[in-house]
Image (cartoon, helix red, strand yellow):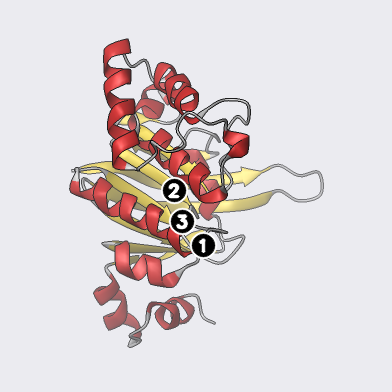
Amino acid sequence: MAIVDIQRLTKIYPDRKKPVTALQDVTFKINESEIVGLLGVNGAGKTTCLRIIATMLQPTSGEVTVAGFSVATHPNDVRKQIGFMTSTTGLYPRLTGREILSYFGRLHELSDSDLKRRIDEVVNEFQLSEFIDRKCDKLSTGQKQRINVARTSLHRPKLLVMDEPTAGLDVLGARTIVDFVRTSKSLGQSVLFSTHRMEEAEALCDRIVVIHRGRVVSDGTINELRQRTGKNELQHLFLSIIGE
């Protein structure tokens, strides 16, 4: 069953001189418990696509549904189904990690008992106990990212949307994200994962969708893409697909 169904998605940004087409007729699906890597060079349209799925942008045309809910007509229902995270997702500096989790848990309408239970679970799962009650402006980059990971998964979303979540992180910080993605799949969640790190995509993704100049130019497993391109390494087959 498809958790995400994208059909002929088009996004045009208005401009006085010339409108900019960021996405044109983009079509692909994400199935249950599937990790899909969204690859493309800068400006290909990846972030626009992810933000439309996350209801942060409205599509110009086309249809996007998440767990059966339309991003255009039922955005609040869609938001309940997703956890959204980027490398630049900020935390409120004057709040502690626990206060951050409580705040977002209440936004997702968790009951007091469920919220307490889930905070205890993510504190244990992501090893936050040493700094969960410290203010976020006192945390290291890696600690902040672990709080963000916990925030993203707190309400057990069906879909995780991750826009280059390991950008700027050291090896340990990136490993936290990679382990989180693997664990999420084992729990039955689906993941849409955008990254420029080809080794991450190769290690994590069940399927790769390549976007180039606003269009999907390839969609398949890594083995299928290898067969189509005759290339073995993901970096080389990606470059072959986009014609570089």
Looking at the rendered image, the quarter that the C terminus falls into is bottom right
Give residue 220's position: percent from left, percent from top. 29, 66
The answer to whether the residue labelled 3 contacts the one labelled 1, judged by CB atoms less than 8 Å apart, is: yes
Secondary structure under tag 2 reads strand
Task: Give me the disc on residue 170.
Answer: 1
Give residue 197's position: percent from left, percent from top. 47, 68
| Of the pair 53 and 35, the residue shown nearer to us | 35
Determine which residue is flagged by label 3. Answer: 173
Residue at screen point 42% across, 33% down: 151
Determine which residue is flagged by label 2. Answer: 162
Amino acid type, mark 1? Asp
Disc 1: CA contacts within 10 A as few (<14), some (14-19) or many (>=20): few
Amino acid type, mark 2? Met
The answer to whether the residue labelled 2 contacts the one labelled 1, judged by CB atoms less than 8 Å apart, is: no
| Of the pair 56 and 68, the residue shown nearer to us | 56
Amino acid type, mark 3? Gly
Looking at the rendered image, the quarter that the N terminus falls into is top left
Tell whether 84 sits left or right of 119.
Answer: right
